[in-house]
Amino acid sequence: MTRRLGGLHVLTDARGGRAALVAVAAAVAAGAPVVQVRAKDCTDRVLYDFATEVLALCAPAGVTCLVNDRVDVALAVGAAGTHLGATDLPVAAARRVAGPGHLIGGTARDPERARQLVAEGADYLGVGPSWPTTTKAGLPDALGPEGIRAVAEAVDVPVIAIGGVTAERVADLVVAGAAGVAVVGAVSAAPDPGAATTELLRALAMAGARTGPPGSGP
Ligand SMILES: Cc1ncc(COP(=O)(O)OP(=O)(O)O)c(N)n1
Ligand SMILES: Cc1nc(C(=O)O)sc1CCOP(=O)(O)O
Ligand SMILES: [Mg+2]
């Protein structure tokens, strides 16, 4: 199966549960190519069950399903990949556990870290915060499109811009070299997650983002 990495990454509401699944279902129906299971402060069993349900929504639609933080849970449910940040398992260690076929993303905030993560085996990078966000506390100052550009120019894997992303801000990120954007609030907290997904996908298409598999051209 083709596993898409560019385009729109929809991250689940960190509280998980039924409302988060309803938003994922709407995003998948609207054509989101990638969904990341991001649930915090829950037991392993709750995360496993939630990830299983998200994957069940993604798989029939050919949507790439990634799991945040936990390569063990990603492998246990059969997800396509795992996203890892600075406090998670190192990318190289996750690669040893998961093998070459598993997609691994890493969080980078500057070109040096980005190159390091790619050398460790990252398939894509999440780069942010692009703009201030209230979704996650404790983040450094926003990078802005120029910060995204600095990382995108330093590596040859897809750069996915995250943090404060809205449909209106997509074009600036794509022009800066982002292959896609990742959102929590813009879809998972939207009154109509399906319509919000459609709007983000339209903005990406208008901006000319590469939304196919790696190496598939513009
Ligand atoms: C696409 C993407 N980019 C960055 C992140 C942030 O990951 P991390 O630094 O591990 O922070 P948490 O998401 O775990 O709070 C991401 N999840 N996805
Ligand atoms: C989970 C996360 N990581 C970030 C980073 O910069 O590493 S920003 C972020 C939150 C993104 O949420 P929203 O789309 O609602 O702004
Ligand atoms: Mg993490």
Image (cartoon, rainbow, N blue to C red):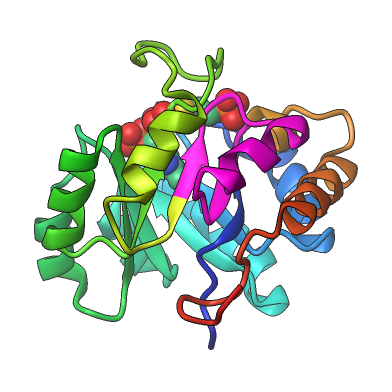
Q: Residue at x 38, y 64 (%)?
A: 81
Against 31, is 39 above or below? above
Chain part drawn in magenta: 160-184
The answer to whether residue 178 is magenta is yes
Q: Residue at x 54, y 82 (%)?
A: 216
Against 62, is 104 above or below? above
Quadrant containing the C terminus is bottom right
**Can you tell which quarter of the image residue 211 is in?**
bottom right
Judge from the rendering whether residue 116 lies leftward or rightward of residue 146; answer left or right: left
Q: Residue 23, how many percent across, how many down? A: 76, 43
**Can you tell which quarter of the image residue 91 is in?**
bottom left
**Can you tell which quarter of the image residue 80 is in?**
bottom left
In the foreground, 203 or 15:
203
Against 54, is 167 above or below? above
Q: Residue 196, how many percent across, how many down? A: 83, 40
In the foreground, 53 or 25:
25
Q: Residue at x 69, y 42 (%)?
A: 171
Q: Residue 94, how many percent across, how many down? A: 17, 59
Q: Residue at x 50, y 41 (%)?
A: 161
Q: Residue 101, how many percent across, how many down? A: 30, 81
The answer to whether residue 111 is magenta is no
